[in-house]
Image: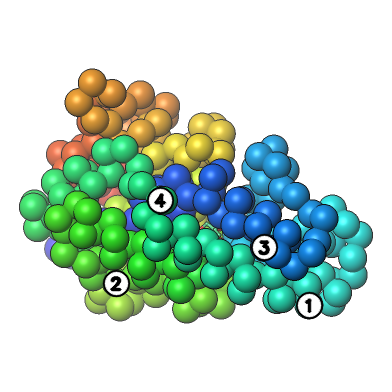
Amino acid sequence: MVANRLEAVIFDVDGTLADTERHGHRVAFNRAFRQLGLEDEWDEAAYKDLLKVTGGERRLTHYFVSYKGLSESEAKQLAAKIHPVKTELFLQVVNDDEIPPRPGVLRFLKDLHDEGLRLSVATTGTQAWVFPLVEKLCKRGGLPPFEEVVTGDQVVERKPHPEAFLLALERMGLTADQVVIVEDSRNGVMAARAARCVCLAVKGEYADAEALYDAQLVVDNFGEPGHPIKVLHNPLSVSAGEMLDVQVVRELYEKAITAPAQ
Ligand code: XBP
Ligand code: MG
């Protein structure tokens, strides 16, 4: 069988392309509560716990059941009313250019692109804000649009289910052993591994490093001149240097693809 080669890198959005959660989504949820006359308020600690549930509407349902004791049907009804308001409020944050890329990620994307690797996105986030956000990030980085942008509302299951990544692979005409997935959270790493893809984790602001150890390489950031990466988990002894670049991705891919199945 011809050994496959690296064809593409698939990126998560929230926490990976941009630190959207703490001061973006969390603030938009709180503004939506206020706008709808609700007393609820998600502080940073509560939000870290609530982030265990992916998908904003499912996160709201989980909150109203687990924190407020509502029945599943009442919670679902309330979540369905709040989430569109939150999405509109977060879209305004995106349109006001208040969501910068994660440091170093545009440099990293450009390096991968210039080396001829295909680039796509697979996120749990909602298309209404994901499309404009990724378009802005690509323009800012002098990059062509991502080949495929799979969002949470295009699939049935949310991460850690692999459906979003499997749909991206299908649309790209690729198999799992031809790509590397870049993620920031435990749910994202689990989804990447469930899709049987090699996973590079760039630890997100809310993630605990040891929760990402199912990825074959875990670092703390993409790396920039003067702000080198810190390697947090490196079971395949990939030479990671000061900044993530296409060489690191290629070495990770080669070592992971040939490593005995864990
Ligand atoms: C992270 C998520 C999303 C966002 C909120 O997605 O779980 O639900 O927290 O966005 P990923 P929505 O890390 O996979 O990009 O409210 O639009 O779901
Ligand atoms: Mg994420």
Do the CB atoms of the residues marked 2 and 4 lie less than 8 Å apart? no
Q: CA distance from mark 3 to mark 2?
A: 30 Å
Provide the secondary structure element on which disc 3 rests: helix
Q: Residue 225: horizontal and vertical position, in percent?
A: 20, 26
Mark earlier in primary sequence (1, 2): 1
Above or below — where is 29 with respect to 219? below
| Callout 2: CB less than 8 Å from ligand 1 | no
Residue sitting at x 75%, y 50%: 41
Mark earlier in primary sequence (3, 4): 3
Mark earlier in primary sequence (2, 4): 4
Circle 1 residues within 10 Å: few <14, some 14–19, many ≥20: few
Mark earlier in primary sequence (3, 2): 3
Q: Which mark is residue 99?
A: 4
Please give the residue where the numbered disc 2 appears in the rendered image.
148
Circle 3 residues within 10 Å: few <14, some 14–19, many ≥20: many
Q: CA distance from mark 2 to mark 4?
A: 21 Å
Circle 4 residues within 10 Å: few <14, some 14–19, many ≥20: some
The quadrant in which residue 142 appears is: bottom left
Q: CA distance from mark 3 to mark 4?
A: 18 Å
